[in-house]
Image: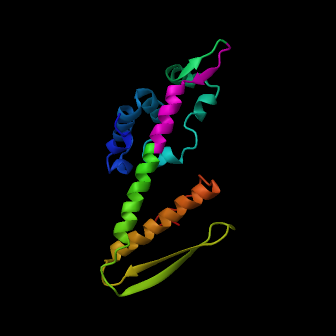
């Protein structure tokens, strides 16, 4: 069987809503797509930020019965257990998407680490997140080689990467910075 990661499109991180659900259906099956769509997990980042997409199935609600019947097995004691194949498909999907995201990040960092000009200006950004330890992000931008918009985008990307790192390291799923707001 060929490596399924090779079938992931390079623009997978841009997929939203129906395009994302269609990909999930093709890659992992309709049941997983239904589970994600029910919860409005509508893109790769949202899925990877969700610790346990099956957690909703633990709730005791009549609104979830149809979903549970599609994804779980109902036991004689009227409890539901997620089908093992569905769990496995979720693990494979998240692992493949994480791997692809990391590959794309490495490619991006390789291309952005090759400055065109030799006249580099160094800068340091000190970011502090609500009484937690400060983190310093250092980088260099080649002056005269990038437009203001490109430099701005580089800084935004660095801050986004820092935010993702803080989320992962500190388990702060509610931590978000928004451009032009924060």
Question: As displayed, is residue 181 above or below residue 173?
Answer: below
Residue 64, by quadrant, is top right
Residue 102 in percent (x, y) is at 44, 55
Q: Is residue 25 left or right of residue 75?
A: left
The magenta stretch spans which residues? 77-95
Residue 167, by quadrant, is bottom right
Main SS of residues in magenta: helix
Between residues 181 and 141, which one lies in front from this camera angle? 141
Residue drawn at (34%, 68%) of the image: 111
Q: In which quadrant will I find the N terminus? A: top left
For the question of whether residue 158 can be seen, the reply is yes
Between residues 143 and 178, which one lies in front from this camera angle? 143
Residue 50, by quadrant, is top right
Question: As displayed, is residue 65 above or below residue 136?
Answer: above
Residue drawn at (33%, 44%) of the image: 6
Membership of 88 in magenta stretch: yes
Residue 44 in percent (x, y) is at 43, 46
Q: Is residue 130 left or right of residue 28?
A: right
Residue 135 in percent (x, y) is at 60, 71
Q: How is the image coloured?
A: rainbow
Between residues 77 and 5, which one lies in front from this camera angle? 5
Most extreme residue toward the bottom, as rendered?
Answer: 119
Residue drawn at (43%, 66%) of the image: 157
Membership of 84 in magenta stretch: yes
For the question of whether residue 40 can be seen, the reply is no
How many labels, in total? 0
Residue 45 in percent (x, y) is at 46, 49
Most extreme residue toward the front, as rendered?
Answer: 1
Q: Is residue 5 left or right of residue 126?
A: left
Residue drawn at (56%, 18%) of the image: 73
């Amino acid at each position: 069987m060929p490596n399924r990661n090779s079938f992931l499109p390079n623009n997978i991180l841009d997929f939203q809503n129906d395009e994302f659900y269609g990909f999930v259906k093709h890659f992992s099956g309709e049941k997983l797509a239904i589970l994600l769509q029910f919860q409005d997990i509508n893109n790769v980042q949202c899925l990877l930020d969700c610790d346990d997409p099956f957690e909703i199935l633990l709730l005791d609600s009549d609104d979830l019965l149809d979903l549970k019947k599609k994804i779980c097995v109902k036991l004689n004691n009227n409890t539901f257990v997620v089908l093992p194949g569905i769990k496995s498909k979720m693990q494979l999907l998240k692992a493949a998407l994480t791997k692809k995201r990391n590959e794309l990040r490495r490619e991006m960092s390789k291309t952005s680490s090759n400055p065109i000009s030799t006249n580099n200006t160094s800068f340091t950004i000190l970011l502090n997140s609500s009484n937690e330890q400060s983190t310093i992000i250092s980088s260099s931008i080649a002056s005269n080689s990038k437009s203001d918009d490109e430099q701005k985008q580089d800084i935004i990307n660095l801050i986004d990467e820092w935010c993702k790192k803080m989320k992962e390291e500190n388990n702060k799923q509610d931590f978000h910075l928004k451009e032009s707001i924060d």
